[in-house]
Amino acid sequence: MRDAISWKGPKISVVEEADASREVAEAYEYWRVESGRSEVPAILKSLSARPDFLKQAVDFCNTIQFSDGHLSRRHKEMIGTYASFLNHSPGSLDAYFPNTQGAGDRAMAALREGNLAGAHLTAAEHALMNYVELVTRAAYRTTREDIQKLRDAGWREEQIAEAVYIIALFAMFDRIANAFGVSAENQVTRG
Amino acid sequence: MREDKEKTASMPDYIQEISKLGLKIKLIQDAEATGETASVYDEWRAKTGRTQMPGILKCFGQRPDFLRQVMQFSDTVHFSEGHLSRRYKEMIASYVSYLNRCPY
């Protein structure tokens, strides 16, 4: 069986910067201005077939992911990192990780490897990561009891809702990354 | 209520099973929405001519700024003709939702 993690190179064509039409070039520039980074990551190039959608993706990621909300930005980064591990998507992580405030810290590095014990999480964070796994693997199987465990751990209703948005956001980007074959350029390749 | 039961009974087994689980996380309902959430709900009802927000959009009620963006990008990439026809997009969405055991 092929392991998605070991695949290298794109499977579906993306528009490179040198080949970008005016609309795609504008979308790439939009991302540069918003992010302050210079090199457009492959995961964003995966949206180049629809530059109008690419710009919207930049906006909604800034709204819901790259900001404090009901959840702190750090907890969102933990959710995204662990979800991408569960989704076998190092390419998505690779694009995402340089942007995280937690980049380089031990907890985040452990979550990238799916190592909950090594992440030294609080009990509440551990409950949250367990829920990330449930929703990522089979959201339809989650129960009211699963939500009660989160409430008992101290998470409020609006925080639980926001956690679901982040898990779903990474389900989307991880699938895009794996479908296109976005490789992990800055992390050790496994598989 | 009886009508609901009859409606559910005619649905595929997996939808019936999932429906039994009921609501797990609290949604902000139409009548209880306030502030920005009420504004976004109003925008959607005005745009569609429908009187009740669908459950899937109410899932985003805790972050109305994000809900507005979800509605916008859904219109851009899904509820429109693009490189794929809207019909093919709907076929993809229907089958993916079946695979995800999602009845919405």
Image: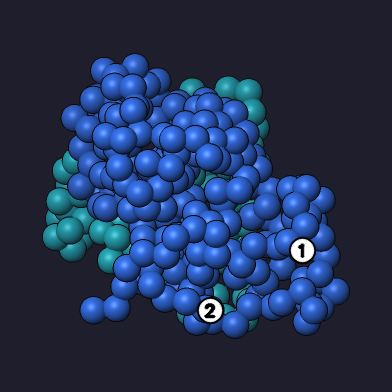
Label 2 sits on a secondary structure element that is loop
Q: Are marks 1 and 2 in contact (CB under 8 Å)?
A: no
Identify residue for label 2: A10
**In which chain is the residue bearing label 1?**
A
Badge number at residue A1:
none
Residue A86, relative to residue B91: is it above or below? above
Q: Residue at x 17, y 58 (%)?
A: B14
B68 or A96: nearer the viewer: A96
Identify residue for label 1: A28
Position in image of residue A108 (x %, y %)? 45, 39
Q: Residue at x 26, y 18 (%)?
A: A152
Which chain is painted in blue?
Answer: A
Question: Crowdedness of circle 2 by 10 Å Cα count: few (<14), some, many (20+)?
Answer: some
Residue A17, relative to residue A158: is it above or below? below
Point out the tag, 1 or 2, that comes first from the N-terminus.
2
B88 or A22: nearer the viewer: A22
